[in-house]
Image: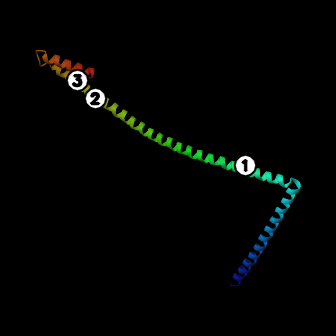
């Protein structure tokens, strides 16, 4: 319990010291500003000091105006970039769909060609049998075979 009293006393003393210290810092800061004003008035003159201050304010205002324009343009360009990214994503999706469609069509073409070859073989086997002695079936099968070969 006794050590807590010492800590409490230390904290109270530190608070007093802090108040005194802050007051002294403020006093010194005020004195420094007075010295600077006197130096400015005697060395470069109050008018030149005010002109410099006004020029600095104008430069700050110009900077803020240009920064505002930059910010607006930056937002516009960010929106444009986002739009282009969305378009690219959409185009990539369409490209992938078209690649799948091409692969599907190529497979169908291959399957159809295999089917066609199977039928040509079957027609050839039937022709080898030559069960129509009059030749009427031969000419019909030949015409059908030629049509299949030509892709009709």
Report the disc number at residue 121: 3
- N-terminal-most mark, 1 or 2: 1
Image quadrant in which you'd find residue 12: bottom right
Camera-nearest label, 3 or 2: 2
Report the disc number at residue 112: 2
Say above or below: 141 vs 85: above
Q: CA distance from mark 1 to mark 2?
A: 78 Å
- N-terminal-most mark, 3 or 2: 2
Are dots 1 and 2 in contact, CB under 8 Å?
A: no
Residue name at image x 20 percent, y 18 percent: 143
Q: Residues within 10 Å of mark 1 (few under 14, many from 20)?
A: few
Residue 84 lies, in percent from the top left, at 50, 41
Report the disc number at residue 96: none
- The residue nearer to you, when weighing 31 against 120, is 31
Q: CA distance from mark 3 to mark 2?
A: 14 Å
Instruction: Identify the residue position indicated by label 1 in the image.
Output: 59
Camera-nearest label, 1 or 2: 1
Q: Residues within 10 Å of mark 3 (few under 14, many from 20)?
A: few
Residue 2 lies, in percent from the top left, at 71, 84
Residue 37 lies, in percent from the top left, at 84, 59
Say above or below: 86 vs 114: below
- N-terminal-most mark, 3 or 1: 1
């Amino acid at each position: 319990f006794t050590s807590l009293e010492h800590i409490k006393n230390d904290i109270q003393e530190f608070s007093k010291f802090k108040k005194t210290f802050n007051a002294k810092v403020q006093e010194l800061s005020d004195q420094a500003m007075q010295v600077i004003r006197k130096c400015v008035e005697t060395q470069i003159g109050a008018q030149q000091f005010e002109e410099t201050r006004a020029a600095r304010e104008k430069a700050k205002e110009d900077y803020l105006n240009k920064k505002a324009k930059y910010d607006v343009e930056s937002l516009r360009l960010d929106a444009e970039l986002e739009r282009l990214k969305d378009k690219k994503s959409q185009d990539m999706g369409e490209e992938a769909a078209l690649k799948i469609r091409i692969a599907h069509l190529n497979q169908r073409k291959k399957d159809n060609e295999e089917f066609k070859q199977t039928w040509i073989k079957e027609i050839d086997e039937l022709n080898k049998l030559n069960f129509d002695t009059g030749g009427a079936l031969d000419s019909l099968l030949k015409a059908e075979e030629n049509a299949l070969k030509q892709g009709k």
